[in-house]
Image (cartoon, rainbow, N blue to C red):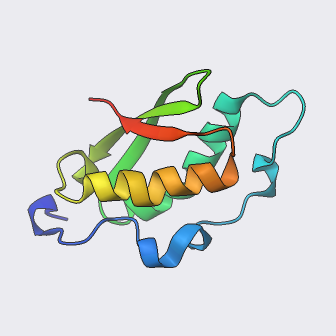
Amino acid sequence: MDAGLAKTPAWKPEAGAEGCKANPSLSVEKGVTMEEQVKAALENVRPNLQADGGDVEFVSVNEEGVVSVRLTGACGHCPMSQMTLKMGIENYLKKEIPQVKEVVRVE
């Protein structure tokens, strides 16, 4: 897909978090790190992005709950990538993992 033709975010905000497959294993469990929870949640988000030629890579999560990700492929230079990041990825992660406070993009 030509990213220059993308007029809407890869993430369909109107679908909400329900657009991803529910993953009950994301609930806070003893012995499961926040990094493991975030990585599992991102696996649910990835098919939505990949459908439009993009992807998301986990970079890090800090103790304040800030998750850093890298958008790649068509998402790396799409004009709607900030909306995809905040309205899609961040909202989904916050819903699934209450400790997540923000998702930021790194290059």
Q: Residue furthest top?
A: 63
- Give residue 57's quadrant in the image: top left
Which residue is located at x 48 percent, y 60 percent?
A: 47
Number of labels in the image equals 0
- Give residue 9's quadrant in the image: bottom left
Which residue is located at x 38 percent, y 49 percent?
A: 55
Q: Residue furthest right?
A: 30
Q: Position of residue 52 (x, y in %)?
A: 31, 65
Q: Is residue 66 visible?
A: yes
Quadrant containing the N terminus is bottom left
Q: Position of residue 75 (x, y in %)?
A: 27, 51
Residue 106 vs residue 98: left or right? left
Q: Nearer the viewer, residue 2 or 82?
A: 82
Which residue is located at x 46 percent, y 40 percent?
A: 103
Q: Is residue 42 above or below residue 49?
A: above
Quadrant containing the C terminus is top left
Q: Nearer the viewer, residue 2 or 31?
A: 31
- Give residue 51's quadrant in the image: bottom left
Which residue is located at x 50 percent, y 77 percent?
A: 15
Q: Position of residue 95 (x, y in %)?
A: 64, 56
Q: Is residue 12 above or below residue 64?
A: below
Residue 6 vs residue 64: left or right? left
Q: Is residue 74 above or below residue 20?
A: above
Q: Is residue 46 visible?
A: no
Q: Is residue 54 above or below residue 101?
A: below
